[in-house]
Structure formats: structure tokens, C-alpha cells
Amino acid sequence: MRSLLDNYLRALEEFFIDYQNGKVPSDISYQKLLIEQILQKCIECTCEIGSKGSFVKGPEKVFVFLPGNVPVVMFQIMPVLLLSGVRDVFFKFSSKEGKFQECFIGYLKRHFKDCLQVSGDFLSHEESLSVAKQYDFIIGFGGEELGQKLGLLGKPYRFFGPKFSIGILWSELSISALENIAFDNLSFDTRGCLSMKFLLTPWEGFEDQLFTCFSVTSRELFPMSDFDMDQSEYEVLRHSLEVQRIVKGGDFFLLFADKLVEIDAARTLVVVKFKDVSELESIIYPYKDFIQGIATDGYYPSFTSCSYVAKFGELQFPPCGWYFENGIILDNFWEVKDV
Amino acid sequence: MDLHTKVKDYIENASGFDEALALEIIEFQRANIPVYDSFLRANGISHINKIREIPFFPADFFKRYEIITGVPSEYFESSGTSGQQSRVFYHESSLELYKCASLKSFPFRIELIYSVIPDFSIAKKSSLSFMLKIFETEYKVVYVNDSYEIVDFLSLVDKLSGMKSGSLLFLTSSQLLRLSEYFREHGLSIDREILVVETGGYKALGKPYMRSELYDFARYAFPRAQFYSEYGMTELFSQFYSTCDGLYRNLNYAKVITSGDGLLRVFDFANLYTISALMVPDRVSVIGECFNVLGRMLEEAKGCAFTFR
């Protein structure tokens, strides 16, 4: 187990250096700074996990459906597989992103040799479900439709469904907090489950500062190459009548509203104003089962499905041993019901 | 001169984009359509100086709101191939501008139109059928089919076999495909110099088709035809035709404002009584005075973030 983790660490480090040097091919240009920071965190976590020496008995063959636009899930899931004695893993890539993921698999193959069979491909939905059936266990990241299909396969599976993250800015309004909020929102163009989609706050009158912070941060977290400003604008404008104000930046939108507007626009933050805890909780409550992470400067409600509470600017960097959803730890990762 | 007359005159005689008139129209619509006023307010628009500064109104709003100035007499309904249908309300004055723009936009010098699109008396909610009805005022229109589907191929072929050279066949792209398939299967063709004008909507064809691919396929059935495409939609009272070397020709009174590639932003003066500055979820590529329609914007659920549906 230890040597597997060592091999993985070497693969990660080598990949990280090559990524820094622009040697990793990719269909989509990701946010380089963010990917590098997450890779560094994954390296730290691999070291930490390795030093603990804990492991569980997992299945032998695992099929993983990766989500689109968030390429780091592959780095985050690998330690679970290694600590569970998995011998054969297949990653189903999302369309248009195969090059990056395939490249990483190349590093894994070089370092694992025969210790672990790693492969991956972009397959159609039908094909991937048919291939997945040949594996002992299926891990799926994606939309509700995928979750339903996995449920029909008759194989043990763990499905990580769609979720979003929120921020609660309460005790201190500062430029640094606003910059970090911009970072949390623009990460993966707001398309990751740990990307902050809504900011809830009792503060007022900080729109201009927030706009400035977004303008500054967007220079570092520039849009991924498949970002389409027009598509975001259309989605934002479609919801114009549900918000009080829309502010358009060069490559982002800020919306000000009094509720969680059900909008799916990339690089868009919805700022929701509340007066007190009870109002905050009533705004969040209908969405409690869909919350992945909460970035806060103090208070956060405990009734949600949130699996990670962070400081502003740290949503993308969950602690080592975080396994995507609330209550999931290494010891129960492979325990599934209703199969 | 009142605004209606100004717009009508402009559609008939426009020689360039009249920004001042466009701004007057926006103020008129804002004053008379509360939803539009709220839309502009939410986008922080108090006073408008230039058309390029305004947010364009998403065509999707026609699915949710009754958008019209004045009292409507009826409404057109979109085909709803992509889900919920749009309802575009109209009255006598708005139809007058529709008529004016449709006739002005129509670029072909012909006398006779064979329409596979059903008569407006059958398709009472179809703006496309209404457009053909307008054409009756200037051209002879022969209706050769009773619905948007083709049920009786034999009867249709029989009617089309009498088509005269120099006439025009008007039909949806889906009808063109079905008809061409039928002609192929039965070894038939109409070997006359005609114009074929189809109405786009390639996503309804069952598989993704390029326009040129569809025409190549249809050329077997109509070997001496010239093929053109009409780009229109229920929410727009003006139409565009592909007379720009296969691309759609931009119009002064229905100006595509999109720069380069992007979603279609159009200012349609004929929409005086609804909303003129519209954003349509079709991707276009603007090249000089022409533009190409690349297809409908995909709502691709990506990433692991929650998608509201």
C-alpha cells in the first residue's frame, strides 16, 4: 500500500512539474493557477495519507464516471482507490477533455506498471454503462440522469450527485474577503460543486468593491477556453426579472437578489441579502440537500448536506481525507445500500 | 408623423440603420410594456444613448409573458421543437408592420409560389403560414399540403409535378428532407428550373444536417433547382434570406448587431409593438453584411455543480 502511494506521489509530482511547464496537452485550457494549487494540495495530502498508514478492503475492479470541466476529481479519487487495494480502474472521461485526463493516466501507468491497471476513454453513455457493468464497483460524478442509470445497473455504486456551494459573509466586510469570494466563485468558472454560486450577506453598499475584486481576480482566474460569455449572458438576462440588479463585468456577472435565483450561468455570483439568522436559514432551507460547501467568516447553518466548511478563498482546497460528501470517510466509502 | 407611420416608412425605404428611430422605439416599448421596463431597470439602464449599450431581451421571455403594447386580438405560437412554446401576441397595427417587413424581405422575383406549408386557415397559430398568407397579396400562392407533416406523398407529388419553371417551392427543411427521401426511393425528380426555399430548423431533421448536405441530398429530387434558406422565427416579424452567397443577408430594418461570432442580437423595427432588441439563443457568425446561423445554443449540463431544471 505504501509503495503504491509512493508511486502515486511520484506520478503526481512529475505531472505537476510538467503541467507547470506547459507540457501537459489539454483540449480545454483550464485555470492554470487553480490547477497548480490543487495539485500541490493533492501532493500534500498524498504525503499525509501515506504517513497515517490506514487502509480498507475495497473492490478489485472499479469504474469511475468523471465529471466535465472539473479535471481535479481524478486526482482526488485516486488515494481512495489506492488505500482500498483496487487493482483495476477505468476512468470514463467527459467529452472534449480526454487529452488532459489521458495524459495523467500515462503518468500513472509509467509509475504503477503492473501494480495497478489504469485506463480511461471517452465513451458514449450507452457504451460506458455497458462497460461499467463488467466492473465490481461504480463511482459516478454527474447529473441526476447518471444517478438514475447507475441505480438500474444492478452493481454496487456510489453516486456523487450535483451540488453547489455558498458563501456567508457576515462578520467582516473587507477587500481581502471580497477577493477570496471572487476566487471561490470564478474557480472552474462556477461549474464545480465547490464553486461558490451564491453569497449570502446582511451587508450593503459593497457592490463597487465587489466588482473591482472580481475584475482583479478574473485576471488570475481567467475563463476556461470553453467559457461562452454570450451563453452566460443569455442565462443571466433570462433571470433579469427575478433579481434587483445585474452588473456585467468583462467576463463575469454579479446579480443582486433577495432569494437563491435558480440560475445556471458560468462566472456568475448571485448576492443574496438577508437581515437575520432566521431569514438566512429560510432562504437556504429549500436547497439544504444540494449544498456541497460553505465558505464563511463565522456562522453557518448545520442542517444542510454541506461536507466542507471553509474560509473564503479556500473552497477548492478541502482537507485531506475529504471524500466529496458529508459523512463519507475511507472506512465507509465502499459501503452502499439498496443493491 | 406618428411612430407607427415612421416605422412603416422606414421599413419600406430604409437605406441605413436609423439609430435615432431605434432609440425612440425602445423608449416607446419601455413606456408601454412593464416587463420590458423591469428588464431594463434590473440591468441598470436608465437612459439609452446607443443601441450597443442596451441588454438585448431574451426571446425566452415570450414563453412566460404576454408581451405587447395595446390590446391583442390573437397570438402566434412557436413550433416548440425545443420545449415550451412562445406566444407572440398581435393586433391589426402590428400585423401591418409584419406584412410590410415580410414583403420587403422577400428577395425573389417570381409570380408563383407552391407552399408545402399549410394555409393559415388550417394552421391558425403559425406565423409562417401567416407569412404565406401575406405573400398572397403579391404572388399567386398554391397550397399543396395540409399540415407541417407530409401525410399524402402521392397527392403532393402529383401537385408538384405540375410546377412551372420559374416558380418557387416554399417548405420547411424537414419537409424538404422527407420529400427528397420519397423522390429518391421512388426514382422521381422535378427537372425544372425552380427556386426551393426552406425555413431552416435543422435540429428537427432527426440527425444533425449541414445546410449544404441537405441541399446536396435534395438535388437528386430537384436537379435544376436553386436552393435558398429563410431564417425567421415567431418572435421576429422580419425574415432573412440566404441570398448572400449562401449566407443570410442582413437588413437595415432588422439589423443583426452581433459582432463576429456569438448569439444572435437583432434589432427588428417590425417588432414595434413587442420588443425590437432581441437576443436569440442561436449562434451566428457575422461576416460583413451577411451572417451564418451555426445552430442553437446547447444547454449542456457540465461540471458537478448543481443544475437547476
Image: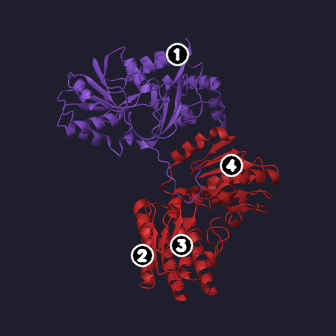
Q: Which residue is mark 2?
A: A106
Can the viewer see residue B276 in this picture?
no
Colour pattern: by chain
Looking at the image, which is closer to me, A296 or B301? B301
Provide residue A218's location: percent of width, then percent of height.
Answer: 59, 56
Mark 3 lies on residue:
A75
Tags 2 and 1 touching, CB below 8 Å: no
- Element at label 4: loop
Whole-percent x and y of residue B218? 25, 37
Q: Colour of chain B?
A: purple
Chain of the residue under the numbered disc 2 shown in the image: A
Report the front residue among B148 and A307.
B148
- On the question of residue A55 being in view, the answer is yes
Q: Is residue A210 left or right of residue A149?
A: right
| 2 or 4: mark nearer the eye | 4
| Circle nearer the viewer, 3 or 4 | 4
- Cα distance between the residues tagged 3 and 4: 31 Å
Front-lying residue, A195 or B191: B191
Q: CA distance from mark 2 to mark 1?
A: 67 Å
Crowd tier of the residue under label 3, counting other residues whose Cα lies within 10 Å: few below 14, some 14–19, many 20 or above: some
- Residue underneath mark 1: B93
Q: Which mark is residue A260?
A: 4
Q: Amino acid at mark 4?
A: Leu
Q: Amino acid at mark 1?
A: Ser
Q: In the picture, one chain is red; tell me its letter.
A: A
Spatial separation of the CA atoms under disc 1 and disc 4: 41 Å
In primary-sequence order, the first of circles 2 and 4 is: 2
Q: Same chain for the residues at labels 2 and 4, yes or no? A: yes
